[in-house]
Amino acid sequence: MLIVALGLTLITSSAMAEEKSLCKVGTVANLVQSGTTWTWTCEGIHGGKSKSCAPKINGKCGTANGVATATAPTTTRCSAGTAGTVTTNATTFTWSCAGINGGNDANCSAPKLNPVNGVCRAVSGQNPGCSAGAMSGVTMNIGTASWNCLGSNGGSNANCSCRCTCSTPNPSCPQGWNCCY
């Protein structure tokens, strides 16, 4: 007999009378599934006590395991078990996925991406650029140049500018830029 109520599937003891692998001793009763978790009762025999049971679930790392990130993972740390607190050092985020009902724990980690701040490069005699970060948003005006050096992995951006040596673009410079001073 199968009864469905409140999102739980309940299989009565008469339907599971032959199921032996769930109980070492006694008979299975009240087998209940809630999401992906099962519980049941092993009814005592010859006056013995009944016992509520649940399977051992080993902790298992989730999809965040091994994926480089600039910030500590907050989701998908464990696909099974209970996610522990994330700790960090200079290069790695670590956490555990605790087993349930006596299951084994799993240790998980993800490489830590360190932030890179954008840094302007405007050296005398050179074209403008970035000594760190990616250059974007370049504008050339008569007598000045401006651009951005974009940070990565949570690093900050830098707004850059320099003055040019002449009042018109110098065609001998790469990309038609004047050299900055």
Image: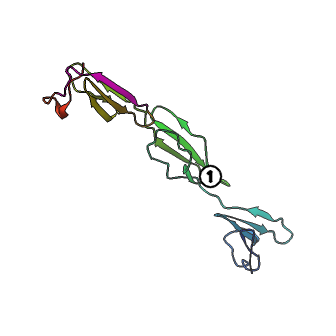
- Compared across the picture, whether 28 is left or right of 175 comes to right
| Quadrant of the drawing holding the N terminus | bottom right
- Relative to 167, residue 6 above or below: below
Residue 100 magenta: no
Q: Disc 1 designates what residue?
A: 99
Place of residue 114 in the rendered image (x, y in percent of width and height, measured from the top left): 43, 34
Outermost residue toward the right? 47
Place of residue 102 in the rendered image (x, y in percent of width and height, measured from the top left): 66, 53
Q: Which residue range is magenta in the image?
A: 156-169
**Neighbour class for label 1 at 10 Å: few (<14), some, many (≥20)?**
some
State the residue in front, 179 or 101: 179
| Quadrant of the drawing holding the C terminus | top left
State the residue in front, 179 or 51: 179
- Relative to 44, residue 72 above or below: above
Place of residue 147 in the rendered image (x, y in percent of width and height, measured from the top left): 32, 31
Q: Quadrant of residue 117?
A: top left
Q: Secondary structure at mark 1?
A: loop
- Relative to 164, residue 176 above or below: below
State the residue in front, 105 or 108: 108
Q: Residue at x 61, y 44 (%)?
A: 84
**Kind of residue at badge 1:** Gly
- Compared across the picture, whether 84 is left or right of 153 comes to right
Q: Residue at x 56, y 49 (%)?
A: 75
Q: Residue at x 19, y 21 (%)?
A: 166
Q: Is residue 63 visible?
A: yes
Place of residue 60 in the rendered image (x, y in percent of width and height, measured from the top left): 55, 53
